[in-house]
Image: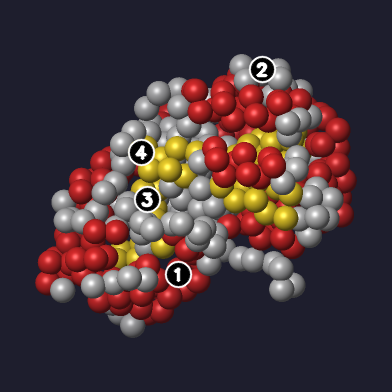
């Protein structure tokens, strides 16, 4: 158990909830949860299934109708030909991480993974006895870019597994085509198996979304982490999928049998309704999110000492606050985060909530999620934050 990590962003939620319980105002930017309604297409289909008695066990791989619909939908969006045997329905996207590691990694194997990154990668690699080889991101005027030097260092350690999260939590980095091609070329050259975490594939505001699975020779070496959580605002429903080569999906299905027997039966009908029904409400969710992004970027850029990109995907911002921390007299991001939370109610995470900071990191970053806070509150929060900084 000493090797098992956690998602410390949930601890920030608890801290923020404690402040709110004292009757104080909290502006929630800490968790990638959503305050938007799940589309009616999903809700209606789930309720109908519940009334129709879809309440018993169902196949471990998921109900066939959903497996087929997802194979079609995910395949169409990526120009790939998936069938039902390429899909394993999961109770969320998150379980794909542990099941991929457990089924494809041997103890002491090296695994290349992003850090900063979703903390469950590091946790699962280490818990199952692997050796994590982290890679970071380089801040450029165009956005954050993969640190290929660190990826090469992982390859030099003999890594055969690579985790790639495009579009990226927490940095909101989005690979341009050349970057994705360069990574795919390395994967082919070194015969890597890739977990492509595409939790935010459909949370894209500008330009077409792209998957590394679509690049030459990648289909057979890529497992996609898919989730209904974000696109369909279904975080608490718990539904996602692993999509990839049949042999790996068969392994993962066997883990399903051992872990949870099957994913929630009637929820799968809800998801099917979401995939097959009108896409209007999903478009509205994106329209709301992009307005929030613009409000948050504008509010942050108005604070002296903050630098932030305006990313075309995800619902996160990863501002560089090196200047702001120096200006307000902080050296440690956690102390800075706590001071802002307790003195203003503005609640966000720090870089350290997304993996252990790497040697040589000198700039300071925080992460703001705008999926759970409305535009007027975003504007007010960032004015309060700016005033706090000016008065310190
Ligand atoms: N991957 C990434 C990068 C995420 O940010 C998240 C959720 N925040 C997940 C996977 C898992 O999401 P879920 O289990 O809700 O599908």
- The answer to whether 365 is drawn above or below residue 51 in the figure is below
First of labels 4, 3 by sequence position: 4
Cα–Cα gap, marks 4 and 2:
28 Å
Secondary structure of residue under mark 2: loop
Quadrant position of the C terminus in the picture: bottom left
- Mark 3 CB within 8 Å of ligand 1: no
Crowding at dot 3, Cα within 10 Å, few <14 / some 14-19 / many 20+, comes out as many
Mark 1 or mark 2: which is in front?
2
Res 231 visible? no
- The answer to whether 326 is drawn above or below residue 294 in the figure is below
Crowding at dot 4, Cα within 10 Å, few <14 / some 14-19 / many 20+, comes out as few
Secondary structure of residue under mark 4: strand
Occupied quadrant, residue 63: top right
Question: Which residue appears at 23% of the width and 61% of the height?
Answer: 324
Task: Check whether the beta carbons of the residues at disc 3 and disc 2 lie within 8 A of each other.
Answer: no
- The residue tagged 4 is 140
Left of 353 or right of it: where is 25?
Answer: left
Q: Looking at the image, which is closer to me, 62 or 173?
A: 173
First of labels 3, 2 by sequence position: 2
Secondary structure of residue under mark 3: loop
Task: Check whether the beta carbons of the residues at disc 1 and disc 2 lie within 8 A of each other.
Answer: no
Q: Position of residue 90 (x, y in %)?
A: 71, 46
- The residue tagged 2 is 216
Question: Which residue appears at 50% of the width and 71% of the height?
Answer: 11
Q: Position of residue 365 (x, y in %)?
A: 37, 57
Question: Which residue appears at 54% of the width and 52% of the height?
Answer: 115
Cα–Cα gap, marks 4 and 3:
13 Å
- The residue tagged 1 is 12
Q: Looking at the image, which is closer to me, 103 or 28?
A: 103
């Amino acid at each position: 158990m000493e090797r098992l990590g956690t998602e410390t962003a949930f601890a920030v939620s608890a801290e923020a909830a404690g402040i709110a319980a004292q009757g104080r105002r909290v502006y929630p930017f800490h968790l990638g949860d959503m305050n938007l309604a799940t589309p009616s297409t999903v809700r209606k289909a789930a309720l109908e299934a519940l009334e129709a008695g879809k309440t018993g066990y169902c196949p471990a791989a998921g109900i066939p109708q959903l497996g087929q619909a997802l194979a079609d939908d995910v395949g169409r969006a990526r120009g790939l030909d998936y069938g039902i045997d390429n899909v394993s329905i999961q109770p969320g996207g998150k379980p794909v991480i542990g099941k991929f590691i457990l089924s494809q990694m041997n103890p002491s194997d090296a695994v290349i993974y992003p850090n900063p990154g979703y903390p469950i990668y590091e946790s699962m690699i280490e818990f199952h006895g692997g050796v994590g080889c982290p890679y970071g991101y380089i801040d450029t005027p165009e956005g954050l870019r993969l640190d290929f030097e660190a990826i090469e260092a992982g390859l030099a350690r003999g890594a055969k597994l690579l985790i790639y999260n495009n579009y990226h939590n927490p940095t909101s980095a989005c690979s341009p085509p050349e970057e994705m091609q360069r990574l795919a070329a390395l994967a082919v050259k070194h015969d890597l198996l890739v977990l492509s975490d595409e939790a935010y594939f459909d949370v894209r505001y500008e330009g077409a979304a792209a998957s590394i699975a679509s690049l030459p020779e990648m289909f057979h070496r890529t497992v996609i982490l898919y989730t209904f959580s974000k696109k369909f605002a279904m975080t608490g429903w718990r539904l996602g999928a692993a999509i990839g080569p049949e042999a790996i999906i068969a392994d993962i299905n066997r883990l399903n049998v051992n872990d949870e027997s099957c994913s929630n039966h009637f929820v799968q009908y809800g998801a099917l309704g979401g995939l097959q029904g009108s896409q209007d409400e999903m478009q509205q969710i994106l329209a709301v999110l992009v307005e929030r992004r613009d409000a948050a970027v504008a509010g942050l850029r108005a604070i002296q000492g903050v630098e932030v990109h305006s990313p075309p995907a995800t619902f996160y911002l990863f501002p560089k606050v090196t200047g702001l921390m120096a200006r307000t007299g902080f050296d440690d991001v956690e102390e800075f985060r706590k001071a802002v939370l307790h003195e203003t109610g503005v609640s966000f995470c720090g870089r350290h909530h997304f993996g252990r900071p790497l040697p040589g990191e000198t700039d300071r970053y925080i992460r703001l999620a705008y999926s759970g806070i409305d535009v007027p509150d975003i504007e007010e929060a960032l004015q309060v934050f700016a005033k706090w900084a000016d008065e310190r």
